[in-house]
Image (cartoon, rainbow, N blue to C red):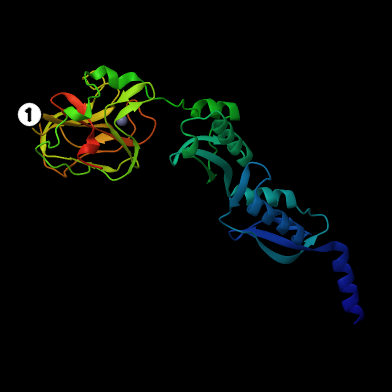
Amino acid sequence: MVATLIISGIIKLTFKQTYSVSLNGEIIGYTNDKINLQKRINTYISSGNGSDIAFVEVKDLPQYTACLLKNNEETNDDEIFEKVTSTGTPYFKYYAITDENTEKVYVQTFENAEEVINQLKNKDSANAKDLGIVEKYETAKAEFKEVSACVDELYEKKIVYTSVYRDIGTQIVNEASVPTDLGVTLIRPISGVITSRYGLRWRDNHKGLDIAAPKGTAIKAAAAGTVIFAGNGAGNGYSGYGNVVVVRSTSSLVILYGHCSEVNCKTGQQVAQGQIIAKVGSTGISTGNHLHFEIRYNGTAINPQRYVYN
Ligand SMILES: [Zn+2]
C-alpha cells in the first residue's frame, strides 16, 4: 500500500498525463488538452479559416491515445494542428454570376453578386432577366472582380428595332393586292407567342411576323421548296436578319426565317414541309429569341397572318 503510493507519487513527479496524437499510424506529437485541440481541428475542417476557405476536406483524422510523457518533454498542439490541416484540401467559397446559366464573372461575396445584378437591372441591361447567382465551392480560387468591373463586363445595351427592314427592297403593301391563295398551304414553323405583327411598328414597317420561343426551338419549313440562302445574312443581301434561311417554294413564293441561332440546311438543298431547317435564336438585329417569319410574294413582303397563325 505504502509502496504503491510512493510509486504513483514518483510517476506524478516525473510524468504528466497526456495524449499521443497519431496520423495515419504515425505519432506526430503530444497534447495535454485533447478536447481543445480536437475542437480547433474540427472547427477548421467544418468552417475553414473564417474568410475565403469554406471548409477543408481532410483525408486522415488524428487518433488520440492516452499516455504518460516525461515532464521535460514538450507538447506541441500548434504543430499537430498544422500537420493535420496541411494534409487537407481547402475548398474556397465564392459566387459566380451567370447569364443564361453560363458562368460569366466571379465575386467573393453574395452581397457583391446581388449588387452587380441590381446595378444591371437599374441600367436596364438587355440581359438583366437572364442573370443568376451560383454558389461555388472549389479547390482553386477564381479570378474575382470588383462590382463595377462586373457591371461593365456584363452590361448589354438593349438594341431597338431600326430601319433595317426598310433597306431590303420590300415594302408593306395594301392588303387588297395580295393573293388569298398562295398555291400552297403553310404550316406553322414553330409554336410560340406572337410578339410583333406585320405592318407599322414604331417609325418603321415590319415586313414579317415575330414569334417568340426559347433559343434552340426547332424551326420547321412552313412549305417545301429549295433553299436559296442559308447562313449569316450580313453582306449577303439579308443584313439584320442574322442567321437566316430563305426557301423558294414556287416561282412567286419565297419564305424567310430570320434571327436563327443555327441553320440546319444548306443553300441549294431541297426541303420538305415540316423538315427542321434551323433553330430559334436572337442573331442579327434582335432583342430576344424569336423567329422573324417573312413571306415574299413576287418579291414583296406580305402579311403571313393571312395564311398561317390566323
Ligand atoms: Zn421581325
Whether residue 169 is situated above or below residue 289 in the rendered picture: above
| SS class, disc 1 | loop
Residue in the foreground of this view, choosing between 134 and 25? 134
**Quadrant into which the N terminus falls:** bottom right
Report if residue 114 is visible in the image.
yes
Residue furthest toward the right?
2
Which residue position is annotated with label 1? Answer: 251
Left or right placement of residue 185 versus residue 195 in this view = left
Left or right placement of residue 171 versus residue 266 in this view = right
Residue in the foreground of this view, choosing between 208 and 27? 208
Residue in the foreground of this view, choosing between 220 and 177? 177
- Residue 147 place in picture, x, y as percent: 59, 30
Residue furthest toward the bottom?
1
Which quarter holds ligand 1? top left
Whether residue 19 is situated above or below residue 205 in the rendered picture: below
How packed is label 1: few (under 14 Cα within 10 Å), some, or many (20 or more)? few
Report if residue 260 is visible in the image.
no
The quadrant holding residue 159 is top left
Name the residue type under label 1.
Ser
Total residue callouts = 1
Q: Residue at x 63, y 50 (%)?
A: 85
- Residue 263 place in picture, x, y as percent: 23, 34
Q: Residue at x 22, y 41 (%)?
A: 308
Q: Residue at x 88, y 68 (%)?
A: 10
Residue furthest toward the front?
176
- Residue 213 place in picture, x, y as percent: 34, 42
- Residue 97 place in picture, x, y as percent: 52, 38
**Quadrant into which the C terminus falls:** top left
Is the CB–ligand 1 distance for label 1 below 8 Å?
no
